[in-house]
């Protein structure tokens, strides 16, 4: 957008929403600027030890004012994403630019979260305050043990997993879900959606030889807050349907992983059929993972949220750390050993890291594993 187009947009906004008052226009920018500043100061300024953050901080007032006007006029959109790979599970993270994070955080905390969070079921456990993986595992363990006391081993579970969740979510369905947020905020939200598209899904749509305007868009970036809330809410209709069924004894979801406990096998099969039918009828772009989705009696061990659940004969659940997670953690500890020996880490850093590891392991039956790690890995300087 050139200067002339921007000036026309300013005048249009002043004459429209500001009733012709330049002062009212400036006051609105000032209000948004103050909010963006507070979000930057409290959330992102702590991540200042990067070149990008340092450059922003040198002229923070100027950049924040530009962002505030772009937000007010509805023309702000992400500049782009920096991709990097993470492992276990392997995936590409698309990190937004530093100043884009400020707007995304402000948009999420002020407009998305207050509207969408009350719509969620209580046991939607991902990325929310006072929830998380730790509590998800505890709730599931406790629920299975309580249900066993009443039903014995006559329990079945349906464990669902979405294949390529973030890469395949439909932009049209997302817009339908989030259309309830503030109208001006929704414009910015659409700009975030339109800034990203799964290359694989785009290639498949292009093969259909449709008119460019008829090509549906799929995929959101893994690495920003709005995408996080898309992941949390995308299956909300499924959550409410399953929890409303009288034969479902327990249900919990952690992002795209969910599990429902029932007393009969046919009930689990019905849930699986409903989920895939719902995905197809609403053109959601997603499907259940053919290998990771599972229907089995509760006596069959299963993996969920990084742990392996196994029902003992006495009705208690034993939690094992998955083998791939053990290997990953040992690799991390060996790296810490090397870094400490070379003087790259302090002993306090080592203590903090190991405390978090052992606190996580204490969730399950890992006494032997913890003793093995503490005996095997010693930290000495060269």
Image (cartoon, rainbow, N blue to C red):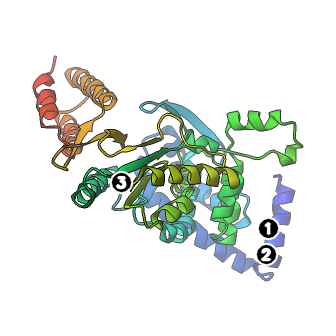
- The crowding category of the residue bearing disc 2, from other C-alpha atoms within 10 Å (few below 14, some 14 to 19, many at least 20), is some
Residue at which label 3 appears: 132
Residues marked 2 and 1 touching at CB (< 8 Å): yes
Find residue 10 and name its label: 1
Residue 53 pos. (x, y %): 50, 45
Q: Which mark is residue 54?
A: none
Q: Looking at the picture, does residue 83 appear above or below residue 219?
A: above
Q: Does any portion of residue 207 appear in the rendered image?
A: yes
- CB under 8 Å between discs 1 and 3: no
Q: Give the label, 3 or 2, closer to the camera.
A: 3
Q: Nearer the viewer, residue 323 or 63?
A: 323
Q: x%, y% of residue 222?
A: 55, 43
Q: Secondary structure at mark 1?
A: helix
Q: Residue at x 64, y 58 (%)?
A: 67
Mark 1 or 3 closer to N-term? Answer: 1
Rendered position, 337 above or below 59: above
Horizontal arrangement in the rendering, residue 335 relative to residue 200 (left or right): left
In the image, taking residue 317 as reference, residue 3 lies left or right, namely right
Residue 261 locus on image (x, y percent) = 38, 54
Report how many numbered discs are placed on residues in the image: 3
Q: Residue at x 48, y 66 (%)?
A: 120
Q: Which numbered disc, 3 or 2, marks the residue that appears first in the sequence?
A: 2
**Crowdedness near tag 1: few (<14), some (14–19) or many (≥20) residues, C-alpha within 10 Å:** some
In the drawing, what numbered circle is on residue 14? 2
């Amino acid at each position: 957008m050139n200067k002339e187009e921007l000036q026309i947009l300013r005048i249009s906004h002043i004459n429209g929403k500001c009733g012709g008052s330049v002062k009212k226009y400036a006051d609105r920018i000032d209000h948004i600027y103050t909010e963006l500043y507070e979000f930057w100061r409290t959330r992102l300024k702590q991540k200042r030890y990067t070149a990008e953050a340092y450059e922003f901080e040198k002229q923070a007032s100027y950049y924040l004012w530009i962002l505030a006007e772009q937000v007010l006029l509805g023309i702000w959109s992400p500049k782009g994403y920096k991709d990097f790979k993470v492992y276990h599970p392997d995936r590409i993270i698309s990190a937004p630019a530093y100043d884009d994070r400020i707007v995304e955080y402000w948009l999420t905390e002020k407009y998305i979260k207050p509207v969408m969070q009350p719509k969620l079921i209580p046991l939607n456990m991902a990325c929310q305050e006072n929830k998380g993986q730790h509590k998800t595992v505890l709730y599931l363990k406790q629920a299975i043990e309580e249900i066993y006391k009443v039903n014995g081993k006559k329990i079945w579970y349906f464990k669902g997993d979405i294949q390529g969740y973030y890469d395949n979510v439909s932009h049209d369905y997302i817009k339908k879900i989030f259309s309830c947020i503030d109208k001006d905020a929704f414009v910015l939200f659409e700009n975030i959606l339109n800034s990203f598209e799964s290359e694989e899904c785009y290639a498949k749509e292009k093969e259909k030889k449709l008119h460019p305007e008829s090509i549906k868009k799929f995929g959101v970036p893994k690495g920003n807050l709005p995408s996080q809330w898309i992941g949390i809410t995308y299956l909300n209709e499924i959550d409410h349907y399953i929890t409303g069924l009288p034969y479902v004894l327990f249900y919990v979801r952690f992002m795209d992983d969910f599990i429902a406990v029932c007393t009969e096998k046919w009930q689990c099969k019905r849930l699986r059929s409903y989920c895939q039918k719902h995905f197809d009828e609403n053109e959601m772009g997603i499907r259940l993972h053919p290998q990771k989705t599972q229907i089995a009696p509760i006596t069959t061990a299963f993996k969920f949220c990084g742990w392996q659940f196994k029902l003992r004969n006495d009705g208690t659940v034993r939690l094992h750390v998955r083998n791939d997670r053990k290997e990953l953690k040992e690799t991390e500890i060996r790296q810490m050993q090397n870094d400490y020996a070379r003087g790259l880490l302090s002993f306090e850093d080592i203590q903090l890291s190991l405390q978090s590891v052992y606190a996580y392991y204490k969730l399950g039956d890992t006494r032997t594993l913890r003793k093995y790690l503490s005996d095997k890995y010693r930290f000495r300087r060269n």
